[in-house]
Each structure stands twice: as C-alpha cells, then as structure tokens.
Amino acid sequence: LPAALHQPPPQISAMASASPKIRIGFVVGKDNDAVEDPGYVGDASFLADLPGEYRTHPETKEYGCTKADGGMAHADCAIPWWIKKNHGEECEIDIIRGDLDLDLDRLKSNDVNFIIGYDLINTMFEDNWRERKAKIGVALKDCGNIWPTWEVQEFIY
C-alpha cells in the first residue's frame, strides 16, 4: 500500500495539531495496590521516573517517598503515569492526590476526571473527617466532570 494511505488527510492532521490537549484528572490515593511489588508480573519500567510524591512508603503507607527510599507506585498512579508517558502529546494528565490536592477548583480545571484511588469514603479515615467529607462531597458533586458521576457515587455510598 502507498505510504499516503497510512497518514490521515492533511485537514485532519491540521485540526488535530491545532486543537488543545484534553486535560484528564485522575483522583488517586491507594496504598494497597503496589505494581512494583515483586509479585507483580508486568513490566513496570515506565515507572522509573515517577516522582516520589506519587509513591508510598512501604511501611507507613504515606505518599512522598522516593523510589531510592523504597517508595512504591500503586495502580492508581501507575495508570495515569503510563498514559502521560505514552500519550502525552494528545493529553495533559493531572494526578490529583485525594488527601492533599482534591478540591472543586482543581476538578473544574480538567476536562474530565476519573476517581481511581480516592473517593468520599476515604475521608472517613482522616483525622478531620467531617470537615473533609463536606469539602470533598461538594467538590465531587458540583464539578460536573467526574466519573463515576455524583449520582453513581451517591448510590454506592
């Protein structure tokens, strides 16, 4: 086949390059689903440069531990990091740490957000849980661009 058949028409290429990147937020916060665990069978080499802010300490489970200090990447951070590394030209990835970064403005700054590691239930385990639950509940309910939708989340909770 001619090489031209493997390329999109020029007008499609021009439109794609002129359009802004879609911003995708991923709400993370898992500390029990390590993908760099020795028992994990996949290739985790793409995580070599994952910043420590997205790694948890193997004993305390707190975020902010470098790989050199034993920090582990969990599935909820590995997924958006893989997308960033493999599709960074098409989209901008926003990894939102639920316990530190999640608020209404942050969610609204993205085109779409996916809850994959932290949600309203997690607030119940935080020190100031009533205040956090109220703040996070408003953010999840009012942002209008999250999946699962607030209605689905409310059904689950």
Image (cartoon, rainbow, N blue to C red):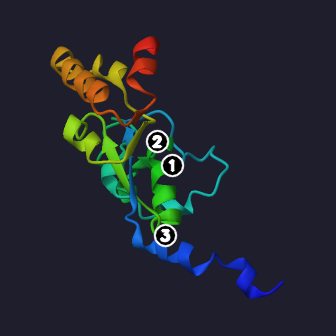
Circle 1 residue = 79
Q: Amino acid at mark 2?
A: Asp
The one of 127 and 148 positioned closer to us in this rendering: 148
Task: Tell me the residue at 39%/43% (across/down).
Answer: 112
- Location of residue 143 by image quarter: top left
How far apart are the alpha carbons under marks 1 and 2?
A: 6 Å
Q: Tell me if mark 3 has few (under 14), some (14-19) or many (20+) residues whose alpha carbon lies within 10 angstroms of its own.
A: few
Q: Position of residue 129 (x, y in %)?
A: 21, 17
Pointer 1 with pointer 2, Cβ within 8 A = yes
Q: Amino acid at mark 3?
A: Ala
Q: Tell me if mark 1 has few (under 14), some (14-19) or many (20+) residues whose alpha carbon lies within 10 angstroms of its own.
A: some
Circle 3 residue = 16
Work out which residue is located at the far right of the displayed protein and give it. Answer: 1
Circle 3 or circle 1, nearest the eye? 3
Q: Position of residue 109 (x, y in %)?
A: 26, 47
Question: Would residue 35 be found to the left or right of residue 26 on screen?
Answer: right
From this view, report whether residue 152 is shown above or below residue 144.
above
How far apart are the alpha carbons under marks 2 and 3?
A: 29 Å
The quadrant of the image that shows the C terminus is: top left
First reached walking from the N terminus: tag 3 or tag 1: 3
Q: Position of residue 82 (x, y in %)?
A: 51, 57
